Image: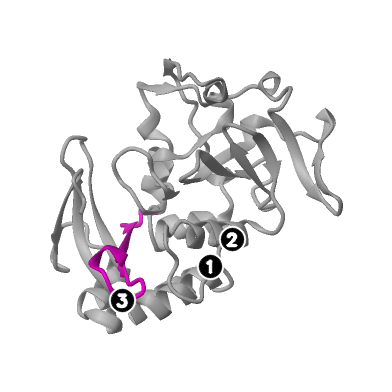
């Protein structure tokens, strides 16, 4: 089921075990799920309403595990959420990993470290049918520029909430994978049929250049399966304005607040939603 990962259950005596998870570790099944959701509601009292509702209705268990990469140098404590589908074939089960939170002082030094000395592809070239591997020196993001509500998720709940942990980080990415998109794009990339847009009353509108965001302020916080990134504008750490970057289409200004859009993205990441749930 997880060919790239080694997963083993752990107890609350494991080194670095988060204090906030001790109640969850003492329970199992639906009781563990309910205890985990108490923490979600405490950390983000007005956010993730759809995701919390989905987990409340369809998550069968939350287990504390240590998850490690079989090839990459990666290891973390995590809550593994087991979500039931229609209840028939075993393949209906889906899993999400909520990595152990990071204390505020440690977070400052860990923002974006996964990008150090990495050889990565330039996403802008994908629309031309080619990827180019290059050495990228990614500039670090100042922790305090990240919206407060998002910082609290990382320090009090989960350092990322992910479907996959073997390189493509689908979901809310870990602190170590945060970066601004100016490391991969420049304004001149947005031309022709690769544009900057927003949805208006009459459909999609192409935005004039004076309404474009500063790419140095667009923080990539989540990824989706279809080559897309969800970004938040950290030019004003409390604005919460979101932008969606689609590597084949361009940059679109999102509607709604950060947590509503992130909530929709995480619910939509389930490849087969449980009965009664729809993508937004």
Q: Which residues are magenta?
A: 82-103
**Residue 147 in the image, given as x and y percentages of width and height:** 59, 52
- Taking the spot 53% from the left edge, 71% from the top edge, the residue there is 50
Q: Secondary structure at mark 2?
A: helix
Q: Is residue 220 above or below residue 257?
A: above
Q: Quadrant of the N terminus?
A: bottom left
Disc number for residue 48: 1
Q: Quadrant of residue 119?
A: top left
Q: Quadrant of the C terminus?
A: bottom right
The count of marks equals 3
Q: Please, what secondary structure does the residue beneath circle 1 have?
A: loop
Say if the magenta span includes residue 83: yes
Residue annotated with mark 2: 259
Q: CA distance from mark 1 to mark 3?
A: 24 Å
The image quadrant that residue 186 belongs to is top right
Instruction: Point out the frontmost of discs 1 and 3.
Output: 3
Do the residues under discs 1 and 2 have CB atoms within 8 angstroms?
Answer: yes
Pick whichever of labels 2 and 3 is earlier in the sequence.
3
* For residue 211, above or below residue 163: above
Residue bearing mark 3: 87
Q: Secondary structure at mark 3?
A: loop
Please tell me which of labels 1 and 3 falls first in the chain: 1
């Amino acid at each position: 089921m997880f060919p790239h990962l080694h997963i083993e259950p752990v107890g609350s005596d494991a080194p670095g075990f988060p204090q906030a998870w001790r109640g969850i570790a003492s329970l199992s099944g639906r009781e563990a799920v309910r205890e985990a959701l108490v923490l979600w509601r405490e950390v983000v009292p007005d956010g993730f309403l759809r995701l919390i509702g989905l987990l409340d209705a369809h998550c069968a268990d939350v287990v504390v595990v240590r998850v490690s990469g079989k090839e990459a140098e990666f290891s973390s404590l995590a809550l593994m959420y087991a979500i039931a589908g229609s209840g028939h074939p075993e393949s209906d089960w889906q899993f999400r990993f909520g990595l152990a939170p990071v204390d505020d002082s440690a977070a400052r030094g860990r923002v974006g470290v996964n990008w150090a000395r990495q050889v990565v592809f330039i996403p802008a070239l994908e629309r031309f049918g080619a990827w180019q591997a290059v050495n990228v020196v990614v500039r670090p993001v100042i922790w305090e520029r990240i919206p407060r509500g998002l910082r609290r998720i990382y320090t009090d709940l989960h350092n990322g909430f992910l479907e996959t942990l073997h390189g493509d980080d689908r979901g809310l990415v870990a602190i170590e994978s945060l970066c601004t998109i100016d490391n991969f794009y420049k304004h001149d990339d947005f031309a022709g049929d690769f544009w900057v847009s927003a949805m208006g009353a009459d459909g999609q509108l192409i935005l004039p250049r004076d309404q474009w965001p500063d790419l140095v302020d667009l923080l990539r916080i989540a990824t989706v399966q279809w080559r897309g990134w969800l970004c938040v504008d950290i030019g004003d750490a409390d604005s919460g304005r979101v932008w969606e970057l689609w590597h084949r289409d361009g940059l679109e200004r999102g509607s709604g607040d950060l947590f509503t859009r992130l909530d929709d993205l995480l619910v939509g990441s389930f490849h087969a939603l449980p009965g009664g749930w729809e993508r937004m």
